[in-house]
Image (cartoon, rainbow, N blue to C red):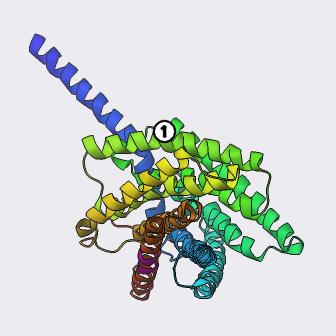
Amino acid sequence: MKNSSNALNLGENKALNSNKNTASNSNLTDSNSALNEVPFSKLAHFPIMLFASVMGLGGLALVFKKASAAFAFSVKNGLNFLDLNAIFATCSFVFGFLSIAVFLLLLGFYVAKIFTHFNAFKAEITHQVKINFLSAIPIGALIITTFLGAFNDNGTMLFLLKIIFYLSSFLQLILSIFVINFWFSNAMKKHLLSPAWFIPIVGNLIVPLAGHSAKITPEFSLFFFSVGCFFWLILTALITSRLIFEESLESKFLPTLFIFIAPPSIFVVDFAALFGGHSALSLMLYFVALFFMLLMLSLSRVFTRLNFALSWWAFTFPLCAFGIASFETFMIFKSPLYMIFGILGLILALFAVLFVSYKTLLAMSKGKICVPEKA
């Protein structure tokens, strides 16, 4: 009798544990099944991650823009660098307007997806990984605002910049609250924690950069800067702990390791925009970015073995951000070493953007984009 009672209790415990495991997996399963239940449509499977391409293209325009300023600065101050100002300015113009065209094209498709395949959109915004890429939309718009700052005429263009800036900033704020609310309200799985979680936070750090171009009062930008720094530090600790003590990232998410470079790099440029100069703190954060840059280069053999995925766009913007920070630091401290780092960042960013663009277009031509993900 006792043995049968124990067996019954054991069976009940197993059933309870099974129910708990089923419940804990419900969010991710529901998100994937929602997409699978939708009749096949390219538009239904249009990936939010494609907006990372705008970050890469726009970031490249910004690094060329900063390189143009740095080389003009070096010639003016007799620091013996070539006068490549005009060439870099032209490259910035080309990639900047290309990023605008790509952004408008992607935005059109994604808005169409929301209206025609709302269940597929809902599945993405309740997915523990894909939800972090939502902020790529306002980030792209903020990067474009920063680029367009070069054409500011203190008249109609400035008015347009302010409109784009405020719309993008408020969307970034709404998505930041939405994403963090999602993190707090759901049982997030530690094995899904990756540097991609930085993306909503990086968006907050880009607001001061765009705000400076749109001539916004520093107090408005300082709010986003403060929020970005706070969650950036927390996520750095959590993600580093996960990478050290938990299982390795899935191969398709390994490129997101490059995102570690972006926040400290953007911090350097933000600091100058907000406070009108640099300090030991901003220089320290630049060296943190440099360390992560060297770390990623040391892992290059790992990255060369990966199969292409849209997550490869994670290579691009952080390299651009490092290049921008290096040229910014050069113009403050006038050390040729920072100029060399800036040129290195520019070359790597240009190669990454061109190569990933080629791989993306090739995947599109083979029908490998906008298809259901493999389980």
Q: Main secondary structure of the magenta part?
A: helix
Q: Is residue 204 above or below residue 139?
A: above
Residue at left offset 33%, top offset 46%: 191
Q: Where is residue 328 drawn, in percent x and y?
A: 57, 63
Query: In the image shown, does 173 or 178 lie closer to the viewer?
Result: 173
In the image, is 274 to the left or to the right of 279? right
Query: In the image shown, does 150 or 234 lie closer to the viewer?
Result: 150
Residue furthest top as drawn: 2
- Which amino acid type is shown beneath numbered disc 1? Asn
Q: Where is residue 357 drawn, in percent x and y?
A: 46, 81
Element at label 1? loop
Query: In the image shown, does 253 or 265 lie closer to the viewer?
Result: 265
In the image, is 283 to the left or to the right of 207? left
Residue topped by disc 1: 186
Based on the picture, tell me whether residue 355 belongs to the magenta stretch: no
In the image, is 117 to the left or to the right of 219? left
Q: Is residue 355 above or below residue 26?
A: below
Q: Quadrant of the C terminus?
A: bottom left
Q: Where is residue 313 drawn, in percent x and y?
A: 45, 70
Based on the picture, tell me whether residue 350 belongs to the magenta stretch: yes
Residue at left offset 71%, top offset 55%: 169
Range of the magenta residues? 347-351
Q: Quadrant of residue 347?
A: bottom left
Query: In the image shown, does 39 or 73 lie closer to the viewer?
Result: 73
Q: Is residue 127 visible?
A: no
In the image, is 8 to the left or to the right of 175? left
Q: Quadrant of residue 23?
A: top left
Residue furthest front as drawn: 78
Q: Is residue 247 visible?
A: yes
Q: Quadrant of the N terminus?
A: top left
